[in-house]
Amino acid sequence: MSPQNTYKFLRRDMLSGNNGAPIDVIQAEGRLDAEAAPALESELNAALRSGHTRVVLDLSRVTYISSSALRVLVGAWRRARAQGGDVILASLSPRVREIFEMVGFDRVFTIHETAPQALSALNADQPAPAPPHDPAHK
Amino acid sequence: MTPPTNSMTDDRRQGLSERRTDDGQPGEGGEVALLTPHLQELEALSTVGRMIALAQGDVDALCELIDREVRRVVETDTFQIGLFEGTHYRILIWRVRGERRAPAAFPLSPSDGLVNWVRRTHQPLLVRDFEREAAILPARPSYQSEAPPRSGLFVPLLAADQAIGLIAVQSDRPNAYSEDDLRRLSILANQVAVAIQNARLYRQAQARAAGLELVARVGRQIAALLHRDELFAQVVHLVQSTFGYYGVSLFTLEPDGSLALQAHTSPEAPCGGPGLQLGQGIIGTAAQLGEPVRADDVSADPRFIYDAALPHTRSEVAVPLKIEDRVLGVLDVQSDRVAGFSDEDVAILRTLADQIAIAIHEHTVYQAERRRARQLATIAEVTRAITSILDLDTLLDQVVRRISATFGYPHVGIYLVEPGPGESGAQVVWRASTGLQMPGLSDPLEAPGIIPWVARTGESALVADVTQDARYVVGPGQEDTRSELAVPLRMAGQTLGVLDVQSNRVAAFGEEDRFVLQTLGDAIAVAVRNARLVSVTRQESAARARLERELEVGREIQLSFLPAVFPQVPGWELAAYWQAAHQVGGDFYDYIPLGRDLPGQPLLLSGPCGLAIADVADKGVPAALFMALLRTLIRAVAIPGRRSPARVLERVNDLLLADARSDVFATVVYVQWDPDQATITYANAGHNPPLLIRANGQVKLLRVHGLALGVLPHIHLDERSLRLEPGDVLVLYTDGLTEALNAAQEEFGLQRLQQALLAARSQPAAGIIQAVTQALSDFCGEAPPFDDQALLILKRE
């Protein structure tokens, strides 16, 4: 077992800015290795249950990601895509980005510089119903 | 036969009197020809010239024309025009006193007659009176007639400094011809010779065009033909219909050195019957020499073997079908004429034979590809079935059915080694088979027979003829068996059983079958072991015990798939290190001989070789099983040696995804290494880039981008090649090595790995491994690794 590994996840339900489908943002922290993979999997499953299909995974505080964790990501990504959603990644540290590039996942996943950018990209993707009072028309 | 030019076998005279009547010039006056006006002569000659031009391309028509025209120019009681063809003289038009005789060919060599003299000297010859000049003639005419001709003209047909034939006219009266006649006939002969030569060239060009057209047709039809037999039948019929030969047949050279008749233009010919041996007959001689063999007169050729399907054969050409220096078979063509084949015919047949050989070769390769595709599918299916079918008997039953259906083996059986009475304490028990079901059948391990032998020795047995094998005993219901192939079901050094196939044909199985069956046997062994452990595990109540058990199975599977020994390749060193984590991962490495040697003899490697290192993103038994599948697929796709590394991994990816039930993916580096050229070509599916440590201390990370396998279909991978110089070290590794942690949660890292490699690069490969593992344990301490670690080193000495 890996000694003294610490990792944690913080999940927030975000309502998309234009009343579209909800987006879950998961903020991960620490080393995402084989030991952390089951916890990551349950966080992603929790997000993808309850009809939510769009998840942003914020990796800004992740120092390392192992193949076990990558496997969990691929599984979640497949399920989300099958339901018309997506798992989008944000804020990869240079080390983590290097791992994604090595495995070729940088061309599988959509990756954004920051979590807010990822959120707005998701919102832009989804055509939203026109709001009743559009400030632009004031 | 005797050369007939001046030998008369017929002395009837009515031909002469008829001709004289026609010409209105009866009588015996010797000056008649000389009285022919010059104008008429010139006109005749120019007419001949014009007509010759018109008849171009048709030698027979040309000869008819000449016969007619010569009659106008000189007196002809007998006339002949003939061509020299190889060792024979073929008379195309032969008229004796107005009576046409059938064309015929006569051997030239034993004769020293006038024809041969003209051929040798290129000189025309005027014989005013055979009787009076007999003593001074340059060659002796041999008369067979009681009333031989009295005078004659012999004029060679000269083209390009070669005597290609001869025109001869003879008269029954002496002094029928003058020098003037000789001159006129010579002028005519010169025109004729050029025309015949042109016609021959034209015919040759036409035949070549027909040959090429035939080759194109053969090529087009091959793509549509599924069976070799159809291909052969098409070839012989096309050759016959294109060139109008009397008979055409095609033989293939079989692995046992015999020549098997594959196709024959005569429906009575016994295809598939006992063939010829090398060196036997004209066909066997051609196959043995690797060169065409021509018999101009088969009745005089002791090698000729009479073919009842072609009773009128007079001459024969057998042309070997060759790819480079390898003889694949023989194309045999027969003619009902003596000397039916000219040098040009042989040259064309030779070109055609080359094309047919290529066609056969490509067809064979195409069939092998199809066969291999089916084999791959079966290997993948059987390997997958192992993970889904838990009940062993159901599984084995399905496996034998599938193998039988895919490969067309008539009898497939699986036997397991189980505890039993007898000295060895073990017995071989029947568990599943196609056809005959034999429940309860068991033999002690020490019993005679091929299956107990394989179970005892753990080696495979490929028996081409069971009657010649001392180990063989007839099994119940297997009286028809003629050949047999049995491979052990091996796992971790233990023989768990035997996979056995039998055929009622001699030599029905080859080395390729042995490879495929052994690959399947490896997979079946995993299933057997797994099922046995599952049944054991079921009886153990403690969950912990089950987990440990599972880990043990995973480790066992993993270990059993790692190469036990590396091949010895002169000038090169291979060494590897592998360490399983407590919670088994899916790292493995493999070497795959791609040359002629099959995996049965791993220590006799020659030619290129595949090196693979992989990391399966999973843990425990599922990882080990996925690893087994991945390893099998890489081997099966790579072994034909026809795909480059990137194409190998792309194909493996599609095969993995054909059954994407899991999210498991794997990263793989696959290197094709050619020891003879000292080159490597590598492709990378998402794995850690290999390291190249040059002898001069230069370190290179061999980066080539690519997605891991099992994620997306139809991926495209890049590949690169480079040359390894003496002292260069290629290092393949998994991330368990670079990402090993110490107590302070620091990674060992690529930097430390590079340093260790650099410092040890001048050592032998095993020493480099030693140095790296030492550096690793110095850094991490003695704690067992959290992830699998694998390291493979290739060093050029």
Image: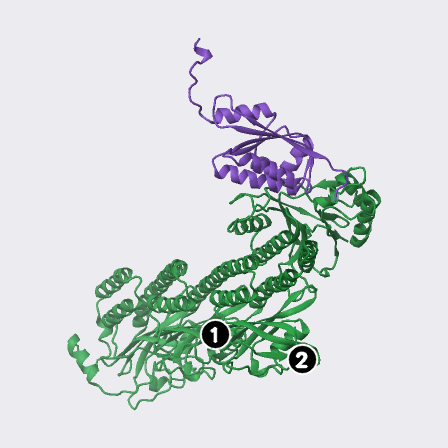
Chain colours: A purple, B green
Q: Does residue A135 sit above or below B131 in this rendering?
A: above
Q: Name the residue under label 1.
A: B435
Q: How crowded is mark 2: few (under 14 residues within 10 Å), some or many (20 or more)?
A: few
On the image, the x and y values in percent for residue B342 come to: 40, 70
Viewer-proximal residue, B222 or B352?
B222
What's the residue at 56%, 37% (across, down)? A108
Which chain hosts label 1? B
Q: Given contact means CB atoms under 8 Å apart, are the residues at marks 1 and 2 in contact?
A: no
The reply to whether residue B761 is visible in this rendering is no
Which chain hosts label 2? B
Horizontally, residue B144 falls left or right of residue B86, namely left
Rounded to the nearest angstrom, the CA distance separating label 1 from label 2 is: 28 Å
* Residue type at the position of mark 1: Gly
- Which label lies toward us, 1 or 2? 2
Horizontally, residue B187 falls left or right of residue B616, namely left
Viewer-proximal residue, B299 or B222?
B222
| Residue farthest toward the top in the current orientation of the protein | A138
The reply to whether residue B723 is visible in this rendering is yes
On the image, the x and y values in percent for residue B460 come to: 63, 71
User: Which is more N-terminal, label 2 or label 1?
Assistant: 2
Q: Are labels 1 and 2 on one chain?
A: yes
On the image, the x and y values in percent for residue B124 come to: 37, 73
Q: Does residue B513 sit above or below B589 in this rendering?
A: below
Q: Residues within 10 Å of mark 1 (few under 14, many from 20)?
A: few
Q: Does residue B520 sit above or below B118 in this rendering?
A: above
* Residue type at the position of mark 2: Pro
Q: Mark 2 points at which residue?
A: B421
For label 2, the SS is loop
